[in-house]
Image: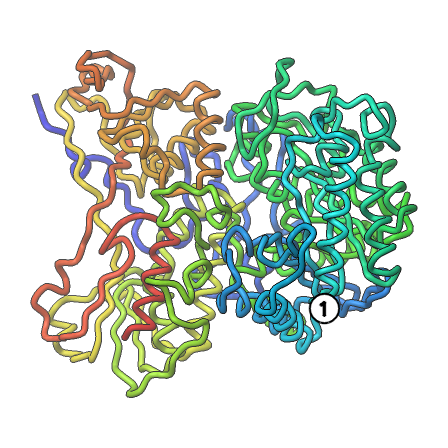
Amino acid sequence: MANISRRNFMKVAAGAAGIAGLGLLNGCSKTEAPASSAAASAAGSAAEGTTTPAAAAPATDKLYTASINPQLDESEFRSNTKELTTLFSPLTIGSMEISNRMVKSAAGSATYLAGLTDELLTYYVNLAKGGVALIYVETIAALEVPEGGSYDADTLAFGQKLVDECHKYGAKMGYQMSGFGMGENDMTIDDIHAKQAHFVEVAKGLQQMGFDCVELNCAGFNMPAHFLSRFHNTRTDEYGIGSIENRARFITEIIEGVKKECGPDFNMQILINCIEENDNISNNPTIMTLDSAVTTPHTLAMTMEEGIAAAKLFEQAGCDSMHLRLGPLGHHVAQFGADLYFILNGIEGCTGFGTQYDFSKNWQGMLIGNTSGCGIGLNVAAEYKKALSIPCGVVTYNDPAHAPDFFEQALEDGKADFFLMTRPLTVDMEYVNKLKEGRIDEIAPCTRCLHCHIGSNEANAQMAYCRVNALTQRVMREGGPATYELEPAATPKKVMVIGGGPAGMEAARIAAARGHNVTLYEKRGALGFMLDFAASVKGPHENLADLKNYLIRQLELNGVEVKTGTEVTQELINSEAPDAVILAAGGLRDTLTVDGDGSAPVVEMDNFMFTEMGDNVIVYGSNAQAFDAALWLTVHKKNVTIVTPNPASEFDMQQSQHAMRMMTTALYALGVKSYPQSAIKTVSGNVATLTLDSGVEMNIKCDAIVNGADMLPNTSLVDGIDCKEVYTIGDCANPFNIALAIRGGNDAGRAV
């Protein structure tokens, strides 16, 4: 029997120009253009290698899932032609005026920056410096006055310093009170009143610290939300579900108490699920916990009309503004990050439970379901605005830098008064100022991967991080950068960066920003090779083309010399005699050799989208690239089987837990089978014999094998070179994902 190596089959001439110009590449059907990467026009960049949006593929070329929620071409909603006049106009909320319509929602403090530390203080001060008009601090127990007690001097001083420092930059300061629930049905009336009194006490303490306002979290799994919910609340008294007034009473009495104790000029905002939907269909009710696999009767989801009726009661009680978010009953992170529904290219609307929303029917048909999650809740917010006289803000990827005209028009049309956001501001803390100054191409883009949310895989390097901003949840901590600021180089060095992917570009921009003389070498004809490839596989949702354009722009701004089409050798390194070398040349994929008759060729991962193959495909591997390939092939009507030598616990581990949940449940629901700790023994006559982890053999149809094996380090280029200061980063050192590649680049740029 002949051995089949990936090196001997399907040597498709992708080449440097081929992969950089992805608009020219064909997928499984010769008539179909691949999924477009993000439109560069929205980022205001004309960087080399930018792809342009392609026309949507005919529905017949893809699985039925792709036609349920067809997406607009990005050029149809990501234009940047308007003056952002309304976005940067002031807004009066109750007794205070904010300078623009971008508000930091209450996320990213207790979850990521717990404790009253210098890191916490600096984090929020940097947001204020960056131009955020109103900052809500997420629940931090240490900032809340103890029940029946008072602040100690250090806590009070910290809170006052936090507020005062942010006020210096014109930011108003708010705080979110949450009150995790799950005991509301067993509470006596006295218990309820005591809990309400403590909320009021906390608000009074925050006012003492100098906060301008508080927000009561009446969404998700918090106690106020439970009282409002017909699913959680089973009481039959005046706090029960007999009427909207009863369901809202716990909240309205807290509003009244805060206004009485703190005065009418101390602002209060209410956060609610403005519309709910059941994403885990069952008639077997259970109690919801954080991101658990709950089952929820559809009939107990709160309608938009019920939410509006409750909001009217909140307004009557003294509420100054509304924070409106979606309420999927089974998937916590999708309550504030519902753009996660669009993370699967060709299965937009996936729920995380193996089902798919039809946005023309689910959610009362009210969601904007054709813009990859951008502004998904604006139409619901518009209905609240019609019914209320207080300002209404809306959350879920309301990112004006992503689609400037789209969001400016939403404000002009009165769909919302302000946008609440966290992820884009965490990625680039100078976001607001850059946008105001017209430097949109300098804004680091949020790639909507959800690595940042606590609950990411433990294997994803200390639970949670940002894919783009290497400082987030690392700065001022052991093992991370000591400061947000870059330390100027004591002596400028000649730095040679090898590799034009995300790791190399990040390393080059940081080193150059510190004052080093940096030259970046890339053997292909354009930068960002694998980012282009990933954008084509994943589709536009994760903004990977935007990330590439941002990094290229940063190289320009920081004076990095870029040499493309130059393959670096040891001889070149030694002849250039750099003071420091940073190797970011990418990893090497292990060779896949399969015994058999050659009826099922092994296809390189880099080539699978451009290679004609039969209907039955094995994807070998279980990393994120392998799963992305399995998704793409499944959407393109292939029968896919995943075979991997790795354990099931490592499936898709390079992606966030939330992305992994969406990916795996959708694929399994569509019939993809996966076999961990298994091997391909042989392929003959288009039949593969697999050896499973049990030792049993089984046969499956197989027309091709896509090699998605784990990458291997690739550092031999710098072995024995004359340069003494050498850094190996990204996939060439420790193959994993884009986030850790950028982290390694940032660290190397700071260390050189």
Residue type, numbered disc 1 = Gly
Q: Position of residue 716 (x, y in %)?
A: 12, 58
Task: Tell me if residue 14 can be seen.
Answer: yes
Q: Position of residue 532 (x, y in %)?
A: 41, 52
Secondary structure beneath label 1: loop
For the N terminus, the image quarter is top left
- Find residue 249 and report its image quarter: top right
Q: Identify the residue shown where x is 36% and y is 52%.
A: 530
Q: Residues within 10 Å of mark 1 (few under 14, many from 20)?
A: many
Front residue of 335 and 19:
335
Front residue of 273 and 601:
273
Residue 203's place in the image compared with 659, above or below, is: below
Q: Is residue 452 left or right of residue 382?
A: left
Residue sitting at the far front: 149
Q: Position of residue 687 (x, y in %)?
A: 24, 15
Residue 148's place in the image compared with 363, above or below, is: below
Q: How is the image coloured?
A: rainbow
Q: Identify the residue shown where x is 13% and y is 78%.
A: 575
- Find residue 589 and report its image quarter: top left
Q: Position of residue 531 (x, y in %)?
A: 40, 53
Q: Identify the residue shown where x is 86% and y is 63%.
A: 265
For the C terminus, the image quarter is bottom left
Q: Identify the residue shown where x is 41% and y is 47%.
A: 463
Circle 1 sits on which residue? 210
Q: Is residue 155 left or right of residue 226?
A: left
Residue 222's place in the image compared with 22, above or below, is: above
- Find residue 159 and report its image quarter: bottom right
